[in-house]
């Protein structure tokens, strides 16, 4: 087996194994796995509505994944994507509700506000790390809670005591009649274009710019980067800021697209944390993130159809989906297994 | 290299975490097989979307589902397309798709359960003008949406009377879910009821800002009981289950402990069972089941109250106190009944809003 | 003759690459058998095959005359084969005994039984003259001592055949002496040793026989007493090697580096450079000789701007560069070959091409208005690869995949290519084989001959003696003397490095004094 074959086999075997174990779980719980998987498939691809909703679900995952991946490329663990996303969501909703502007200005303004809010939320841990060496994981985790509860309080303030903001103005919405008609009134919005544009932006920054060269260099070896005259601290801060901006835009997807408002959150959305898995599945590359987000988004949305069409309770569905992701994420183990098999064969 | 390993380790931990999380969420629910009774094509098919509390929240959603089931069985429908069914929402982003899925399965009437679904019901109702919708606990002004509201304050008033009469420490607690107008009606009525009996009783009020976090409810109850509160009224959906477990733990540790919970929405007597004791004093019934069944019946009879708001209170049998299973003595029950009649007759008007807003 | 290990016609492939091609090594009982080859010749691969980490594609292994499949390191351990790795595999904050028993901890009624193990460790230590304290923490003992712990570990597990992988790479001269003593002791106790090295002098000093491999091929086995370093070098490299680097007289002109009363603290705030004065002129190589830890690292870091200067002045090209940002200093005409090439010299996960641009990526034409031009970077990299004979599969290959010598050539290429007025070369040949050393020395002299200045920092006396035009001896943060390599001996230099005044060593028993100084350092 050549390396190329192994590279191709690993994800396929991972997914098949995940599906098999998931099927066993369904069988043992007394449900028909074939119906279940057909429902899952249909949940993602059945009609234009399903496809529209799936893409809608993928958009924030892409941005959350990019945020984690970008920081990771500079050697930083941004666990704060969740919080950055929440403040971005609020900022976009606030701008969307408060200002009266033509769409051509309003949408970019709201997006920028979201990116700026996320960037600000990334700036704090970045500065603390650069100036005082405080580990970013601790700070970003705490910043998540600060974001959650501050935003909940802010929502009450700006809405006059209500549990959610007013709906955003039409001019700030990423939704469109065209997309709604195309996908039979799904909540699909133009956010996916924003997300894909950011994939290109991340690729461009990392692969084409001087800044990207520095960021990667610092990520791989900060000592050598310092010896080469790079400002390591500046790059740490910059990386967290850009990462936070991606996350903030992820929040804008919810504010300007999916919901059109922001309601107080009882807990974390989970998108930011799933972003970690998305980034790791995608090997922290921009293209890989699209793959990871698509897998996550499709499974997550398609899973909703399993109780709907196959009568499998949502709890069982959660286990099955988690198993599939588990096996994909642990593709490393399968790779090692394959290589060992290979080695044994070679030895004989 | 080490970074790559860390990444791997993290992904494994994450994956494992998701699985464990999923296991934790599995409540081992039973699912009945579709009944074999014949189909009545003429009957309206009805389905509902739960909010994030889930269908077995032993409270609001469960009550609504009971109404749907009752309607369905009454009309010989089965739990399937063309009959009756429900979909659970895991997150807020599920509301729109779930409503849509049910519309696509050609249910004639689709309920959105809970205030949180207001905007989703509104949006989908506009997109699908041919389907009838109903929303509980919110008002959506749309010709194909029937809005169902309750006078929670009335039942809460009765609960307040019961608590004020039953307390030994003169300290009573109230645990609210999110600070929403509907929950504030509970609070306002409860305080008014307590005050009607004894204005000197202190009511300890706490909002957990979540409907699905039992651990927050448990923490709030722990604090209250520890401070001397002996009766807690909760209006917090799934969060309230934590109040029950805290009370039960205390009862288990000391069977003579004087701790009580007043349940909400459904009769939560079963929730309060611990060994041979029960810590459920009574429950404020918000008969979502009756309202849901009622609206379904109206729709079936071509009298669907679209575009209208129907309010259920004591007078409409939408609100009541549950059987206390002998906990509350007859004389107090008589007093409660007296208040109940006065409210139904309009002699007492229970306030809708708490006296002072936080 | 009895062979304890026979590796016959071993072949190991990695994809299309043949790492070991028909290599035969036969180890007699009770001998020290050297395995000699350049970096990347396949020595480590061969030993990993013996240790069960790799499975060979061809050939066979016999242990004590019996054909054996060594499928994994456990098999090797059970056969009494132990490996003393070049990079120690020790847990810093555990004690010696804890490290030794790690992995098969002895238990007494379910409880860890350290005491008995410590006793056993002490016994073995005494038997072989290792002098290791079983209760010392790894982080508190010297590198040489840590290596003895590694040796102890293998002996504790019953090793009869010990493989030493480049054991002297990180040792001081005194520690090397002691190690050789330990190896001899091991032999007299009946052990057999395979010594992997590319240092010819060590082989001559300690081994009985030598097996030479070159570019993955077995060249043959010779008896040490019948050969000499020149012959061995020729066998290893495949051509004649000059040991004494040819160089003409220097023609120093104006001063390029001027250091005045420099004081620098280390990371703990302890003064390491204590009022140092130094001057380097264009057209000369100044070697800084000294024992590790006398302020060399802090001096370099101060010159290059990586460490704060407490007081004093550094001038480069008559421009004051004290406390300036590293990049500004670099742009003032400084090149720097750092002493730790993995940590400071290269971004190992970057490609060869990216590494070639590490110092100049931000300048035109490599980047313009913030956008990189990777085509030009690649062209540049290819030029460096060619000019400096960097053996790589191409500029896309990660720097990690290169052998140490080629990594160093890449760094030197990158630095020299920028044509700096002053090149600081810190331990530029550490861990390299004679071929690479020769090449690097030539390049340094070339720099000098082009009218540039070179500041060489090295712990190896013969390197300093060989290359420098002037030698500045550093001791306790100061330059204690500046001597000419042609007018001084290694012994005199050694005494200066140990802090003796020039007058004192007239007539002193030179070597002993040096060794004693070294011993003291160890014990601390």
Image (cartoon, helix red, strand yellow):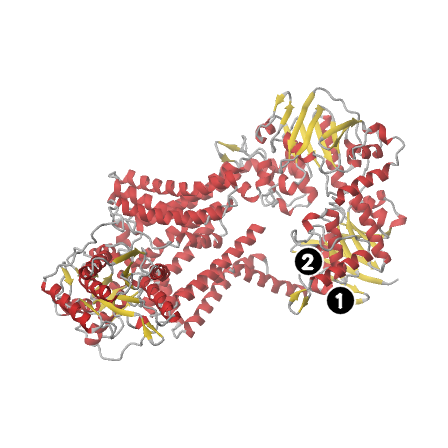
Mark closer to the observer (1, 2): 2
In the rendered structure, the answer to whether residue C154 lies left or right of residue B230 reads: right
Asked if labels 2 and 1 touch by Cβ distance under 8 angstroms, the answer is no
Q: Quadrant of residue C428?
A: top right
Note whether residue C190 is visible.
yes
Q: Position of residue B2 (x, y in %)?
A: 58, 51
- Dot 1: few (<14), some (14–19), or many (≥20) neighbours within 10 Å? some
Q: In terms of secondary structure, where does tag 2 sit? A: helix
Chain hosting mark 2: C
Helix, strand or loop status at disc 1 = strand
Residue tagged 2 = C98
Q: Chain of mark 1?
A: C
What residue do we see at 81% from left, 37% from top? C242
Residue drawn where x is 81% and y is 65% of the image: C64
Where is residue B41 drawn, in percent x and y?
Answer: 19, 74
Which of marks 2 and 1 precedes in the sequence?
1
Q: Nearer the viewer, residue B190 or A131?
A: B190
Look at mark 1 in the image and give the residue it sits on.
C68
Seen from the viewer's position, the closer of residues B6 and C214 is: B6
Q: Nearer the viewer, residue C21 or B156?
A: B156
B192 left or right, relative to C515: left
């Amino acid at each position: 087996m050549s390396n190329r074959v192994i590279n191709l086999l690993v994800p396929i075997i991972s997914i098949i194994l995940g599906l098999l174990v998931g099927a066993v779980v369904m069988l043992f719980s007394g449900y028909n796995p074939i119906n279940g998987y057909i429902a899952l498939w249909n949940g993602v691809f059945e009609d234009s509505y399903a496809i529209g909703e799936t893409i809608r679900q993928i958009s924030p995952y892409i941005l959350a994944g990019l945020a984690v991946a970008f920081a990771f490329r500079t050697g930083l663990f941004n666990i704060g994507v969740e919080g950055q996303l929440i403040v971005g969501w609020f900022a976009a909703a606030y701008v969307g509700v408060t200002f009266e502007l033509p769409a051509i200005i309003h949408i970019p303004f709201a997006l920028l506000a979201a990116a700026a809010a996320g960037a600000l939320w990334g700036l704090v841990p970045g500065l603390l790390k650069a100036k005082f060496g405080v580990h970013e994981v601790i700070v970003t985790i705490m910043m998540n809670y600060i974001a959650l509860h501050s935003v909940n309080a802010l929502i009450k303030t700006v809405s006059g005591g209500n549990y959610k903001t007013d709906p955003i103005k039409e001019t700030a919405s990423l939704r469109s009649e065209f997309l709604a008609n195309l996908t039979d009134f799904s909540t699909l919005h133009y956010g996916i274009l924003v997300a894909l544009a950011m994939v290109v932006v991340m690729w461009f920054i990392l692969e084409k710019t001087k800044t990207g060269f520095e960021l990667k260099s610092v990520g791989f070896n900060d000592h050598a980067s310092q010896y080469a005259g790079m400002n390591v601290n500046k790059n740490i801060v910059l990386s967290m800021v850009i990462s936070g901006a991606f996350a903030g835009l992820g929040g804008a997807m919810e504010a300007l697209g999916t919901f059109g408002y922001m309601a107080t959150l009882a807990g974390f959305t989970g998108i930011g944390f799933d972003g970690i898995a998305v980034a790791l599945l995608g090997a922290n590359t921009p293209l890989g993130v699209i793959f990871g987000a698509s897998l996550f988004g499709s499974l997550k949305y398609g899973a909703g159809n399993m109780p709907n069409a196959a009568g499998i309770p949502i709890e069982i569905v959660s286990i099955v989906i988690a198993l599939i992701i588990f096996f994909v994420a642990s593709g490393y183990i399968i790779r090692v297994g394959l290589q060992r098999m290979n080695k044994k064969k070679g030895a004989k | 290299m080490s970074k790559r390993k860390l990444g791997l380790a993290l992904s494994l931990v994450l994956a494992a975490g998701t699985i464990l999380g999923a296991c934790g969420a599995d409540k081992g629910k039973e699912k009945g097989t579709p009944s074999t009774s014949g189909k009545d094509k003429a009957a309206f098919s009805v389905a509902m979307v739960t909010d994030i509390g889930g269908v077995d929240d032993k409270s609001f959603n469960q009550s609504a589902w009971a109404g749907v089931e009752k309607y369905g069985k009454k009309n010989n429908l089965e739990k399937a397309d063309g009959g009756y069914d429900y979909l659970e929402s895991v997150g807020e982003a599920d509301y729109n798709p779930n409503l849509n899925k049910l519309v696509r399965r050609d249910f004639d009437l689709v309920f959105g359960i809970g205030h949180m679904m207001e905007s989703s019901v509104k949006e989908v109702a506009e997109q699908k003008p041919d389907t009838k919708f109903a929303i509980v606990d919110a008002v959506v002004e749309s010709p194909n949406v029937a809005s169902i509201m309750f006078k929670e304050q009335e039942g809460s008033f009765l609960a307040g009377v019961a608590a004020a009469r039953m307390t030994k420490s003169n300290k009573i607690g109230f645990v609210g879910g999110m600070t929403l107008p509907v929950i504030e009606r509970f609070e306002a009525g409860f305080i008014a009821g307590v005050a009607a009996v004894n204005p000197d009783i202190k009511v300890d009020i706490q909002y957990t800002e979540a409907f699905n976090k039992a651990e927050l409810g448990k923490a709030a109850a722990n604090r209250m009981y520890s401070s001397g509160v002996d009766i807690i009224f909760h209006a917090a959906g799934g969060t309230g289950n934590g109040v029950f477990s805290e009370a039960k733990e205390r009862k288990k540790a000391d069977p003579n402990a004087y701790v009580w919970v007043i349940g909400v929405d459904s009769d939560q007597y079963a929730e309060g069972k611990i060994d041979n004791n029960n810590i459920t004093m009574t429950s404020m019934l918000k008969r979502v089941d009756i309202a849901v069944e009622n609206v379904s019946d109206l729709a079936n009879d071509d009298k669907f109250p679209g575009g209208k708001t129907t309010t259920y209170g004591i007078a409409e049998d939408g609100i009541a106190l549950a059987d206390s299973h002998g906990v509350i003595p007859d004389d107090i029950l008589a007093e409660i009944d007296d208040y109940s009649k006065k409210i139904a007759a309009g002699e007492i008007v229970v306030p809708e809003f708490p006296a002072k807003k936080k | 003759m009895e062979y304890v290990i026979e590796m016959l016609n071993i072949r190991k492939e990695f994809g299309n690459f043949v790492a070991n091609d028909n290599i035969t090594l036969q180890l007699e009982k009770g001998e020290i058998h050297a395995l000699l080859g350049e970096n990347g010749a396949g020595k480590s691969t061969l030993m990993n095959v013996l240790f069960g980490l790799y499975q060979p594609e061809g050939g066979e292994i016999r242990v004590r005359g019996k054909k054996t499949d060594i499928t994994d390191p456990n098999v090797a351990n059970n056969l009494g084969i132990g490996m003393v790795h070049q990079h120690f595999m020790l847990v810093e904050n555990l004690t010696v005994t804890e490290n030794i028993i790690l992995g098969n901890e002895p238990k007494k009624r379910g409880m860890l039984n350290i005491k008995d193990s410590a006793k056993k460790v002490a016994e073995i230590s005494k038997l072989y003259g290792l002098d290791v304290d079983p209760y010392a923490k790894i982080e508190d003992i010297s590198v040489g001592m840590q290596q003895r712990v590694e040796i102890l570990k293998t002996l504790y597990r019953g090793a009869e055949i010990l493989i030493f992988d480049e054991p002297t790479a990180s040792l001081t001269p005194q520690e090397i002496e002691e190690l050789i003593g330990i190896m001899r002791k091991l032999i007299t106790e009946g052990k057999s040793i395979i010594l992997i090295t590319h240092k010819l002098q060590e082989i001559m000093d300690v081994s009985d026989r030598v097996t030479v491999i070159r570019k993955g091929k077995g060249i043959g086995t010779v008896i040490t007493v019948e050969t000499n370093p020149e012959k061995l070098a020729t066998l290893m490299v495949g051509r004649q090697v000059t040991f004494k680097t040819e160089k003409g007289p220097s023609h120093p002109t104006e001063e390029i580096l001027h250091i005045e009363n420099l004081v620098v603290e280390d990371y703990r705030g302890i003064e390491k450079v204590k009022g140092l004065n130094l001057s380097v002129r264009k057209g000369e190589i100044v070697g800084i000789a000294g024992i590790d830890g006398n302020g060399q690292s802090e001096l370099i870091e101060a010159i290059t701007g990586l460490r704060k200067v407490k007081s004093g002045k550094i001038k480069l090209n008559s421009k004051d560069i004290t406390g300036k940002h590293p990049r500004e200093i670099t742009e003032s005409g400084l090149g720097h070959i750092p002493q730790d090439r993995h940590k400071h010299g290269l971004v190992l996960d970057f490609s060869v091409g990216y590494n070639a641009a590490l110092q100049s990526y931000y300048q035109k034409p490599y980047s313009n208005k913030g956008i990189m031009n990777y085509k030009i970077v690649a062209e540049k990299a290819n030029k460096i690869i060619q000019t400096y004979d960097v053996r790589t599969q191409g500029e896309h290959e990660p720097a990690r995949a290169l052998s140490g010598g080629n990594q160093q050539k890449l760094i030197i290429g990158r630095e020299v290519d920028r044509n700096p007025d002053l090149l600081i070369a810190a331990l530029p040949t550490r861990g390299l084989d004679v071929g690479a050393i020769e090449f690097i020395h030539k390049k340094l002299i070339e720099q000098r001959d082009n009218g540039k200045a070179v500041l060489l920092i090295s712990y190896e006396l013969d390197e300093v003696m060989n290359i420098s035009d002037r030698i500045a001896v550093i001791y306790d943060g100061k330059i204690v003397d500046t001597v000419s390599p042609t007018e001084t001996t290694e012994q005199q230099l050694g005494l200066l490095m140990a802090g003796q005044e020039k007058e004192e060593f007239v007539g002193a028993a030179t070597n002993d004094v040096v060794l004693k100084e070294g011993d003291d350092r160890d014990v601390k």
